[in-house]
Image: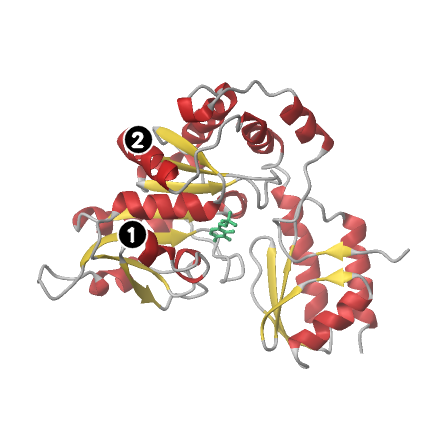
């Protein structure tokens, strides 16, 4: 049988035996009544990790982001984000649909924006202008190839937001990848953000779920919004148990994913069919191909290496929990055999 190694996304992971066991033995209740002790434990644990007051468990990162945006804005307001932002590009127009808010886009470097870039885009008080009320950062930046903000880069943005009375939200779908790379302490994040969305089903390997962290008042409002979006789940503790397990067992190992991404990038850089490899910081490798990306994706797939094109000549590899050293070795062998 041919080896297959799937590098499409860090969302494709399956629960490990240990995680399944934790799920099977979870104590559950009706979370819409606030009675699921495992959900409550996950929310408290995640909030404490990031130095935030409270949390709310949701089915997806799209929902945690959209709830945060709704909590932090009023209709007719405007938010500021990089033009590659997931909240803008990949959440189905939810900013407009859910919050009736417009979006001011910036041209960051690999999706990373600065206080200097944000400041001139904050609207003055004038009836012609939508009221700027929120800044959204993404860490790591998905479309930016897993690029990271350090806390040092975030501080001046948080200060600017504070001066202008803007809320600051973090789309932390891969926040633990960022923390692994930068060495920053999760606990310090609570000082700078009003909202933090943490994904449990990307690099951390849980089957479902994200947690939104904020102060108690915001989370109270978030519960109303989650309900209206249809995101109230009942015995969700089975899923929350997977999240707790992931936080306890799958954070430390992210450095393995990063090392694997590094190996792939280094080997790709040597290949004649690759024209450029973008900088790699975490678990995402973006590279450009001489021939059309779709043709290369098909050639790789024919040998069991599954990946995705993200542009006409660009391919993305993502490393994750289900990629083992042998899989990386096999991928390198296939890279060398192409053309
Ligand atoms: C995956 C992702 C999300 C949320 O995705 P869901 O599939 O809705 O859980 C949000 N932001 C970023 C940057 C992501 O990569």
| Residue 33 screen position, x and y as percent | 41, 22
Is residue 127 placed above or below 169 in the rendered structure?
below
Q: Earlier in the sequence, mark 2 or mark 1?
A: 1
Secondary element at image label 2: helix
**Res. 247 in view:** yes
Q: Is residue 85 left or right of residue 284?
A: left
**Res. 172 in view:** no
- How is the model colour-coded? secondary structure
| Residue 97 screen position, x and y as percent | 33, 56
Is residue 324 placed above or below 40 in the rendered structure?
below
Classify mark 2: residues with Cα within 10 Å, few (<14), some (14-19) or many (20+). some
Question: Quadrant of residue 67 in the image?
Answer: top left
Q: Is residue 178 left or right of residue 223?
A: right
Quarter of the figure with the N terminus:
bottom right
The residue that appears at 59% across and 45% down in the rendered structure is 203
Q: Which mark is residue 226?
A: none
For the residue pair 193 and 38, the one nearer the viewer reads as 38
The residue that appears at 71% across and 35% down in the rendered structure is 16
Rounded to the nearest whole Å, what is the CA distance between mark 2 and mark 1? 17 Å
The residue that appears at 46% across and 59% down in the rendered structure is 90
For the residue pair 77 and 142, the one nearer the viewer reads as 77
Q: Is residue 109 left or right of residue 236?
A: left
Is residue 322 placed above or below 26 in the rendered structure?
below
Residue where numbered disc 2 is placed? 220
């Amino acid at each position: 049988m041919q080896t297959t190694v799937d590098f499409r996304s860090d969302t494709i992971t399956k629960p490990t035996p240990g995680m399944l066991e934790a799920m099977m033995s979870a104590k559950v209740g009706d979370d819409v009544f606030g009675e699921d002790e495992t959900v409550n434990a996950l929310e408290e644990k995640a909030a404490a990790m990031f130095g935030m007051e409270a949390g709310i468990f949701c089915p997806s990162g799209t929902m945690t982001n959209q709830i945060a945006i709704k909590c932090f804005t009023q209709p007719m307001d405007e938010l500021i984000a990089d033009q590659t932002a997931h909240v803008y590009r990949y959440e189905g127009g939810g900013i407009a649909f859910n919050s009736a808010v417009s979006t001011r886009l910036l041209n960051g470097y690999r999706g990373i924006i600065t206080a200097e870039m944000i400041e001139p885009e904050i609207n003055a008080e004038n009836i012609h202008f939508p009221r700027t009320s929120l800044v959204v950062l993404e860490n790591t930046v998905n479309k930016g190839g897993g690029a990271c903000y350090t806390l040092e880069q975030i501080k001046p943005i948080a200060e600017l937001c504070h001066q202008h009375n803007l809320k600051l939200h973090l789309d932390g779908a891969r926040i633990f990848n960022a923390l692994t790379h930068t060495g920053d302490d999760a606990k310090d994040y609570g000082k700078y953000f009003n909202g933090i969305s943490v994904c449990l089903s990307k690099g951390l390997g849980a089957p479902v779920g994200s947690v939104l962290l904020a102060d108690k008042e915001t989370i109270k409002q978030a519960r109303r919004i989650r309900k209206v979006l249809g995101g109230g789940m009942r015995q969700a503790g089975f899923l929350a148990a997977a999240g707790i397990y992931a936080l306890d067992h799958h954070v430390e190992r992210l450095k393995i994913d990063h090392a694997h991404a590094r190996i792939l990038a280094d080997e790709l850089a040597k290949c004649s069919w690759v024209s450029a490899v973008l900088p790699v910081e975490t678990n995402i490798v973006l590279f450009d191909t001489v021939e059309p990306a779709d043709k290369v994706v098909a050639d790789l797939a024919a040998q069991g290496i599954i990946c995705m094109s993200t542009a006409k000549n660009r391919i993305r590899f993502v490393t994750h929990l289900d990629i083992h050293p042998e899989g990386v070795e096999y991928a390198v062998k296939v890279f060398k055999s192409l053309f």
